[in-house]
Image (cartoon, rainbow, N blue to C red):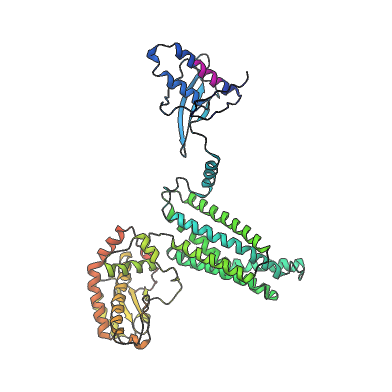
Amino acid sequence: MAPIKIKQSPTSAAQTLASSQDARLLVRETLRINANLASAPSSTSASSPSSSLVAAESCGLRADSSFALLEEDFKDSRLKIICREEIDGRRCQYVAEKDGSGRFKKGSIRSVSLQTPQAPIDELMSFIRSYVAPEGFPDSVTPSYVPYMTWRALKHFFGGAMGVFTTQTLLNSVGMSRNRATPGAVAINWILKDGAGRVGKMLFARQGKKFDYDLKQLRIAGDLLMELGAGVELATAAVPHLFLPLACAANVVKNVAAVTSTSTRTPIYKAFAKGENIGDVTAKGECVGNVADLLGTGLGIMISKRNPSLVTTFALLSCGYVLSSYQEVKSVVLHTLNRARFTVAVESFLKTGCVPTLQEGNMKENIFSFPWSRNRPIVLGTRFKDAFQDPGSFLAIKPLFEKEKYMITYNPSKGNVYALLKDQAKSDDILKAAFHAHVLLHFIRSSHERRSSYSKHGEYDGQDFVGTPSTHSLLTTADLEAHIAESCKVVSNSYVFFKRKAAEQGWVMSESHLNPGRARLC
């Protein structure tokens, strides 16, 4: 029997049914049902059209939206709707065929789509979205996911383009293009270069927990190291006879950057995930990075064929890479209060009485305050010898902290506020000590600003307490003790209020994110 073509109403596009036995059967049953309905009593006419429409739609015909599809047996038909299913917004129904005795035939279940066929461009976009967007997007991720992935893709794009030039330069320097070395010597140099990189990767892994609480700072540091390594690789073009030491140094730096990127990747993706979909978010994020890297590599190849200025090209691509990296890190919104975000939260609280929102706190965070930097205005968990210059200053403030599990002081010679922790200090005591240290620093800076308005012995740059020893000596012992006593009163009245305000904004506080020192007063 030849395939039958059925024309739909003017509002529907014409469709041609396949000549398979299943399609012929469905069409035949539809026509037979319509013929039976023409002679059926009027009492049954109300429900019959729906059944015929179901059968017609099972054949690929579009049903008018004014009719509802009913899950009931086809009248006088061997076909029956079993169930309906929806997946990723696409609906379909399953039908099965009965034999003469009314039983279902084995293997007769088939799926029939209830969706209007998508346009080719829509199908292409759905295909791409399945690779770059997590399931349930955008409801399955936080709002900061899109800007982060945008800048991440742009960063990988520039990185891929730079990789073309650095690899080409390395190959030229090692002697592959000018036959300056035998293949064996080339292989040995390349192996030594890679081996040195692995050593650097192992050494930097000792940073440990810093990857958890200062991940933004380490992430931007890793990207800057990646740029430094690429620059060293390009330098081998100027001094090819120093290929081995320069290539080894560059590979060590780039592998350190790779460790940083890998170690901070999971906490960042975890911040985007809603629910238990971190694996999906990670997979799609890596896919976006790889696609952008391939596109960047293609761009680099096309540019390299024109023999452009190596320095100019590298400078432009580096600017794009660093800018994208900075915006990528700044777009991450974390809920935890590390030292940098804790500083933002406390300073805002002391000035305005309010704790910044998650977005505000993350945007104001200083991502260039690297964890290994020793130039910090506040030192948490310090040793006694660093905090006090003489026993008198210790004995003078000791009574103020009899009921606390910590002590706070200021060392004028170093310009730092020190928080000493007692051996009974718990998590909340450490958080309170950090809060108290910021309060004392706020009082000292305010006093310094007032003094600076009358004297020009030092300067205040708005970020860190800066000045010469003579400037610090302007703060007398009596003034310092007064500031410490005043800070104790403020902390006793405002610390609980600060914690409540921080919790209302969604901040999560833990002493581990503040990275306190291990020294304790016994």
Q: Position of residue 496 (x, y in %)?
A: 25, 64
Q: Nearer the viewer, residue 395 or 110?
A: 110
Q: Position of residue 470 (x, y in %)?
A: 35, 88
Residue 252 located left or right of residue 415: right
Q: Residue at x 41, y 59 (%)?
A: 333
Residue 514 located left or right of residue 253: left
Among the 4 quarters of the image, the one containing residue 4: top right
Q: Position of residue 446 (x, y in %)?
A: 29, 78
Figure quadrant of the C terminus: bottom left
Q: Is residue 152 above or below residue 62?
A: below
Q: Nearer the viewer, residue 466 or 384?
A: 466
Q: Residue at x 65, y 65 (%)?
A: 167
Among the 4 quarters of the image, the one containing residue 491: bottom left
Q: Residue at x 30, y 59 (%)?
A: 503
Q: Residue at x 54, y 28 (%)?
A: 14
Q: Position of residue 297 (x, y in %)?
A: 62, 59
Determine if the magenta segment contains residue 26: yes
Q: What secondary structure characterizes most of the magenta part?
A: helix
The total number of labels drawn is 0
Residue 100 located left or right of residue 434: right
The answer to whether residue 203 of the structure is visible from this angle is: no
Figure quadrant of the N terminus: top right
The answer to whether residue 32 of the structure is visible from this angle is: yes
Determine if the magenta segment contains residue 396: no
Magenta residues, start to end:
25-32
